Image (cartoon, helix red, strand yellow):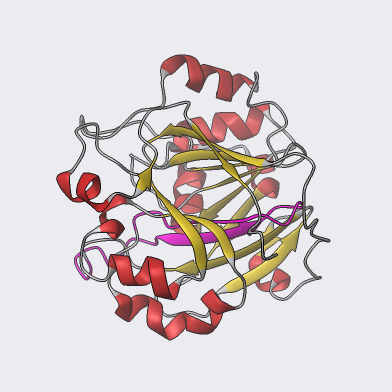
Amino acid sequence: MRFLLSLLIGFATAPLALAHPETPTETTYLGNEGIMVSDGHTTILFDPLFPNGFGTYQMVPEEMRLALMAGDAPFEGIDAIFVSHMHPDHFSVDEVIVYLETHPKVKVYVPAQAAEWMREETENEEIFDRVVEVPLEYKDAPLSFHEGGLTIDVVRIPHAGWPGRADVSNLVWRVTLADGITVMHLGDADPNDEHFAPLDAHWQAKQTHTAYPPYWFFGMWDGPQILNERLNASRATGIHVPINLPPVLVFSGADFLHEPGETRLLEPDQSE
């Protein structure tokens, strides 16, 4: 049976969080906005499979991509994949279909637009039992639900370039792993506070340990204000960083991921 998000809103409670996990949660950079987050028990991927970097953004190295598709180390035991939006530097419809066919325990969380595209490309209806479609429209209330060891919150924030790409469903995922670490992946969110301010209760409802915004949040428009004052995030690490580093990012002094394979440890704040 297909997952219907409308049935999951408000379902269950958050999993028991450990104040000091024995194994620190680690983020591994794959390429562009692709990251893997693992606490040693649960492993999730954001935007890991995409066919095009447009000659500008880091691609997932071929050896790493093949290991990911095969489920070889360090990509064995993946629990869930989250997709921000369906642009080709974030989402490969063909590879996601193949991945679901070859990894029968993995669930994929996607905008409804991406799920519709998947249905156009395959007749294998069985894989859609593990596809969670998010049908959010702009200004819809966020959705929150619990799935296995994950607590997942999602909201639609317009794609950068608003309002020129208003038709693109860009999802901001906030995911809490069983060890209590919470991460946020912003996709290609537009750095304008008019999108974020009305959702203040959503941001304040849970502290994020690390947010992963596209690099332009560190020096463009309302980006710094959103990161520092709006998201309730202890820290931020930039992604979607071009191969040629943008001066605005370098001069900001911000942390960012740029070389596939580099990692960051995520630990609870001392005050927690």
Compare residues 87 and 213 and report the one nearer the observer: 213
Q: Residue at x 57, y 24 (%)?
A: 68
Is 180 rendered above or below residue 65? below
Compare residues 177 and 268 and report the one nearer the observer: 268
- Judge whether residue 179 is colored magenta: yes
Question: Is residue 127 in sight in this rendering?
Answer: yes
The quadrant where residue 17 appears: bottom right
Residue 35 rendering spot, x and y as whole percentages: 50, 39
Left or right of 102, for residue 190: left
Magenta-drawn segment: 162-188
Image quarter of the C terminus: bottom right
Q: Residue at x 21, y 37 (%)?
A: 245
Left or right of 102, for residue 110: left
Residue 80 rendering spot, x and y as whole percentages: 65, 44
The quadrant where residue 75 appears: top right
Q: Residue at x 26, y 61 (%)?
A: 160
